[in-house]
């Protein structure tokens, strides 16, 4: 396991919510976090069928463009009764051709559960795979999983993506209803980052 001893890290995302979450999680370790948009990077095509494959695509493209160490993630919601869908297609379900509409994506997820008459609780997991890649191409991989269930109707204005329909195990509110401090302490991304910090930062 290679230790990270730099002070600047590019997070390969154009998602403002993800960037803010990552910046907050890494702030205690003195790491200056910048995003792909700040560096003027385009989003590469995510052509792999796994979270780790897509995260590596994003990391490699950003490393080659900037020469900086890069942290890339691929994450999504995997709904058991839908065979793990949307999974790597989590963001695709929100694509409209004119930006992403997560209200539409959440409605699709619930309708597909209704179509298969999925039994309650409609269990699901948020999964996050992180790839930390150095300029020489070496990378380390970390995963975080947050189990829970899909609920309806959407609840809460916090968070982003599918957060308003995901209720983590052990809680009676959705991620969309949680203050950012609570969500950041238990999210799938927080768990993956915790594993990374323990291995390469602490």
Image: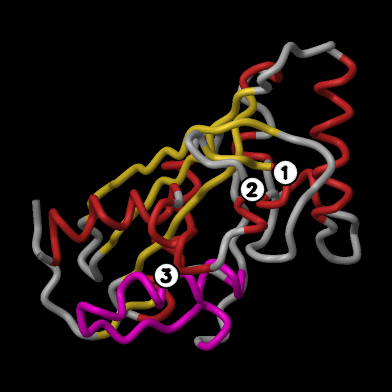
How far is disc 3 from disc 1 in space, using C-alphas? 22 Å
How far is disc 2 from disc 3 in space, using C-alphas? 20 Å
- Picture residue at 46% right of the left edge, 39% below the top: 146
* Mark 2 / mark 3, whichever is N-terminal: 3
- Picture residue at 63% right of the left edge, 47% below the top: 173
Pinpoint residue 138: horizontal percent, then vertical percent. Answer: 20, 57
Whether 192 is drawn above or below 182: the answer is above
- Quadrant of the rendering where the C terminus is positioned: bottom left
Residue holding disc 1: 165
Horizontally, residue 48 falls left or right of residue 79, namely left
Please tell me the numbered disc located at residue 22: 3
Residue holding disc 2: 174
* Mark 2 / mark 1, whichever is N-terminal: 1
Discs 3/1, front: 1
Pinpoint residue 19: horizontal percent, then vertical percent. Answer: 50, 73
Pinpoint residue 77: horizontal percent, then vertical percent. Answer: 61, 39
């Amino acid at each position: 396991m290679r230790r990270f001893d730099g002070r600047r890290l590019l997070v390969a995302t154009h998602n403002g919510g993800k960037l803010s979450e990552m910046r907050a999680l890494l702030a205690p370790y003195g790491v200056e976090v910048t995003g792909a948009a700040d560096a003027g990077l385009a989003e590469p095509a995510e052509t792999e069928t796994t979270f780790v494959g897509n995260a590596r695509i994003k990391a490699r493209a950003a490393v080659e463009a900037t020469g900086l160490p890069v942290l890339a993630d691929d994450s999504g919601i995997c709904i058991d009764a839908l065979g793990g869908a949307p999974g790597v297609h989590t963001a695709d379900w929100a694509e409209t051709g004119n930006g992403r509409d997560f209200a539409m994506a959440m409605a699709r997820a619930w309708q597909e559960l209704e179509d298969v008459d999925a039994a309650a609780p409609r269990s699901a997991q948020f999964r996050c795979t992180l790839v930390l890649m150095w300029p020489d191409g070496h990378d380390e991989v970390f995963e975080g999983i947050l189990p829970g269930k899909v609920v309806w109707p959407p609840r809460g204005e916090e968070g982003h993506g599918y957060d308003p329909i995901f209720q983590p195990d052990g809680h009676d509110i959705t991620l969309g209803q949680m203050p950012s401090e609570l969500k950041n302490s238990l999210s799938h991304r927080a768990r993956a980052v915790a594993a990374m910090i323990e291995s390469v930062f602490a």
